[in-house]
Amino acid sequence: MAQPAHLTTPVDAVVTRMRALDAALPERDGVAVFNRVYLAVTEEVDRRLDAGEFADPRAAALLDVRFAERYLAAVDAAAADRRPPACWRPLFQLRRHPGVRPLQFALSGINAHIGHDLALAVVDTCRSLGCEPADLEDEFDRVGDLLVSLEERIREELMPGPDLLQIADPLTHLLGSWSLERAREATWAAARALWALRHCTDVAEEFTERLDAAVGFAGRMLLTPLPD
């Protein structure tokens, strides 16, 4: 598999940017909540890259960077009063809403990033490496496994308390309707479809727009304000 001579943006630079955001944003800000989660993921990917735990570290690093760049581009767009992709708009629009819980912010960001950005990052990486999505499946799965384990941890850490684990509780009901594992499976299918459509520009653009809108709709539902 052809390899790029270098990465335009090293993983360390992405981590540095996320740490700067973490320091600059108010703790309760919804984007800050997601950023802390994503920073933990990126730091762990970086650690595993340094430890040689990826079979193809250059491909894994490139996928990680292309993935992160899409989130950071959305942050930059919002900061410049430009419209971020539809999948990110609910989080930026409701980031300071007092009726939205931290867990909702975290999962809405994960939904946007996994449901939309990851599929496009796979295609970006394939173009850069001159490979097929199947060649990245191991790296995709390793990053996905890490995200699933982290999702379990943040659900435990950000759930307000055991009294809210009742099946009738609105937060439990709302968040139980979304699954990272299902989102991850759909993303892999979307990435393969986009790669197959890469020579059909109009169809690929329409597919991407529909994906963006659908993921944004799910993100908006995850951010439904709830009573105290």
Image (cartoon, rainbow, N blue to C red):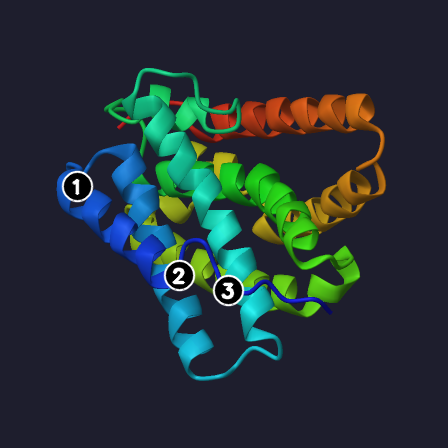
Q: Residue at x 23, y 52 (%)?
A: 19
Q: Amino acid at mark 3?
A: Ala
Q: Quadrant of residue 5?
A: bottom right
- For marks 1 and 3, the one nearer the N-term is 1
Task: Pick the residue in front: 178 or 38.
Answer: 38
Question: Closest to the observer: 93 or 218?
Answer: 93
| Residue behind mark 2 | 11
**Dot 2 or dot 1, earlier in sequence:** 2
Residue drawn at x 58%, y 60% is 144
Identity of the amino acid at label 1? Glu
Residue 179 left/right relative to 220: right
Q: Residues within 10 Å of mark 1 (few under 14, many from 20)?
A: few
Q: Identify residue for label 1.
A: 27
Instruction: Name the spot of residue 124 as percent of width and height, x first.
Output: 63, 46
Whole-Å distance between the Cαs marked 3 and 2?
7 Å
Location of the C terminus (image quadrant) = top left
Q: Count residues near mark 2 (Cα–Cα under 10 Å), then give few for <14, some for 14-19, many for 20+.
A: many
Q: Secondary structure at mark 3?
A: helix
Corner quadrant of residue 95: top left
Q: Nearer the viewer, residue 162 or 21?
A: 21
Q: Are marks 3 and 2 in contact (CB under 8 Å)?
A: yes
Residue 169, image x, y percentages = 42, 36
Between marks 2 and 1 in the image, the one whose residue lies nearer the viewer: 2
